[in-house]
Image: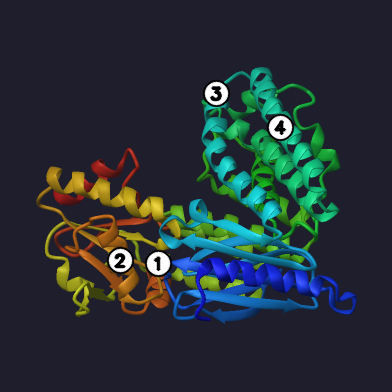
Amino acid sequence: MKIHFLSFIVLLTLIGCKNDNNNSEHNYAYLGGQIINPNNDFVVLSKNDMVIDTIKLDNKNRFLYKITNLDEGLYTFYHGGEIQMVLLEPKDSLIFRLNTLEFDESLVFTGLGDKKNNYLINEFLENELQEKKIFKFCQLKPHVYQRRIDSLKQLKTERLNEFKIKYNTSELFNRIAQGNINYGYYSSKEVYPFVHFGTNKAAILKSLPSNFYDYRKDINYNDKFLKDYQYYNSFLRYSVNNLALKNHLHHSNEDSFSWNSICYNLDRLNLVDSLISSAVLKDDLLYHFTSNYLSKSSNTENNNVLLNSFLSKSKDDVAKDKMKRFALSLNNLKVGSAFPSTIIVDTNDSELDINSLLKSPTVICFWSHSYIEHFKEIHYKISELKIKYPEVKFIIINTDNNNQKHFKTALKENRFDFKDEYQFKTPLESVEALAIQPITKTIIIDKNQKIVNSNSNLFSIKFEEQLLGAINR
């Protein structure tokens, strides 16, 4: 399409208006957009974890797609590792414009259906900022904390009610927007015992007002409508953490709570198995909690115990195979092991085995366009560490499965040096082989090319101590 973006908006609106009078074919929606600094040349559209289509961008990085036989609700569009949801209802003609370097923050909708989607994306961004406040509020006493988050919920509810009246919103939108508020509020309640200072979680639970968790009696832990909804899924994870904590404290002899307790983590899987009947939700939670534990544990025996528990409960054969490969990769990265042979590509498109670079104490860390703030933060941090530890080599690897152009563009636009910057030749295989989960994973190697720590973190208070240990070996 050789039209300007403004003309693109007008055309899409006219298409929606023209079809508006055709009652025989009203169950459709248009979705289109323009992507600045695209990471590849396509967008993937899906709903309920089922891919609807892969849509090619034109030569101006735009697309326009008609969904016929629309199943109204939340749809997901995926581009270059980033995911965002849109609400589509009959006769919507929705387009967006975004910049991949600031994905969520740059996302703006226009066209028929824009008001409700701009409302939802603004709520999403506000909740990200509010989360930091919530974590600070968690240090307050329970009754004070409850007043604070009750007040936040009230403000959000009033704002939503005003929006509903002004734009005469649909029942579907109202349900999703209210779910936003409710499940964000419930999550704030569920995280309190964990974020509140102190390791005596039993005492914290006893200090809570008797009605603190009254809303739980009305929760559907198997809601099919909300199963793909981010706030609902986040709530389920927080709630399982909390309910499992209560069960764990009944039989635990541990003096203080630890996320790494194998007993607690087994309690979590057992709770998921008994509480959740929806196969999709159960398998997702089992996978999340198991991979989270394995990615942070260096105890092979405990890893095997939790893995076996997961395998006995999950019904998802693909997830089970993936988890077994993940556990195997972690075992191959044990302390004292040689770093696996891995082909990387430098900024001149030259291929080399990473082991050819490991001639001194080395730190290997990773980044992805999906986590742009982390990308910036690790580069700032490494700049400081290079001055402090000149004898250490720092290798920074982009994990995205796209071409060199986007990798180098991100470095250029943020004025980062190309030195020590690489990509994987085969990203998907390498990410799995090195068990890169989460993206903050950092690997420390000694001068003998042996792994000292395969699961460090540049921002951990223990990182420099771990690095000094590798230097002095």
Q: Which mark is residue 275?
A: none
Is 363 situated above or below 463? Answer: below
Question: Can you identify the residue that label 3 sits on?
Answer: 139
| Dot 3 alpha-carbon crowd within 10 angstroms: few under 14, some 14 to 19, many 20 or more | some
Q: In terms of image quadrants, where is residue 153?
A: top right
- Answer with mark 2 or mark 1, whichever residue precedes in sequence: 1
Q: Amino acid at mark 2?
A: Thr
Q: Which residue is mark 2?
A: 409
Residue at image point 76% right, 51% down: 176
Q: Which residue is mark 1?
A: 37
Nearer to us: label 1 or label 4? 1
Q: Badge 4: few (under 14), some or many (20 or more) residues near its Cα, within 10 Å?
A: some
Q: Nearer the viewer, mark 3 or mark 4?
A: 4
For mark 4, what is the residue?
A: 153
Residue at the far right: name it: 24
Q: Residues within 10 Å of mark 2 (few under 14, many from 20)?
A: some
Q: CA distance from mark 2 to mark 4?
A: 41 Å
